[in-house]
Image (cartoon, rainbow, N blue to C red):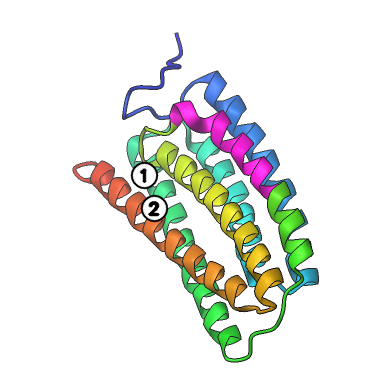
Amino acid sequence: MPHDHDHATDFDGASPTYKRALIAVIGLNAALFAVEMTAGALAGSRALQADALDFGADALTYALSLAVIGRAVTTRARVAQLKGLSLALMGVWILGLAIKDALAPGLPRAEVMGVVGFLALAANVASVLILMRWREGDANVRSVWLCSRNDAIGNVAVMGAAMLVAVLNSGWPDLIVAILMAGLFLNSSVQILRKAQDETHGHP
């Protein structure tokens, strides 16, 4: 009988309910990647583009998570390590873009940031609620939860930045939020990589 509990810290995702939930979240992330990347380019918002990149990376890595469910612990942990490294690369890339733009900050379109940020937040809250019961588990399962949580936090920050851009008539809030999101990516990367390392210890 498949395990479908929400309390075991070593839950590996091997339940039909979890797999269906993950497929739904993959679909949401892929759709929002397309929407936010387009809107970010049109609005000139680094914060929106950072969030869009996160959506796209999540869709790809969640698909990997789904593919390795039921595999050996070392296989699942190595996929989690890949996701941790991808988060670190995203964080460094967004940080670099934000620093570059800080030398000549533009003025993003606050109304586009606000509307798209709200749409993305709704999708992410739905994802977080879908995955809430599986927020603990092995490195593979935990990485999915952390990425979804990051998305929701990022969308709240984007909406806050949109409001400040409109009030202050400045592009700095957008850049500051992009830098904070980069920090969040790096922090989550460290958490995932540490847990994956613990799981591969003693499993050649």
Q: Main secondary structure of the magenta part?
A: helix
Quarter-of-image position of residue 54: bottom right
Q: Is residue 51 magenta?
A: no
Look at label 1 and name its amino acid.
Answer: Ala
Residue 171 drawn at (x, y percent): 65, 78
Q: Compared with residue 174, is residue 78 higher up or lower down, i.e. above or below?
A: above
Residue wearing tag 2: 81
Q: Tell me the residue at 46%/24% (across/down).
A: 14
At label 1, counting other C-alpha atoms closer than 10 Å, the crowd grade (few under 14, some 14-19, many 20 or more) is many
* In the foreground, 136 or 74: 136
What SS does tag 1 mark?
Answer: helix
Q: Is residue 125 magenta?
A: yes
Q: Tell me the residue at 45%/29% (across/down).
A: 134
Residue 165 drawn at (x, y percent): 67, 71
Look at label 2 and name its amino acid.
Answer: Gln
Residue wearing tag 1: 77
Magenta part of the protein: which range?
Answer: 120-134
Q: Tell me the residue at 45%/45% (across/down).
A: 146
Residue 192 drawn at (x, y percent): 36, 50
Residue placed furthest toward the front: 167
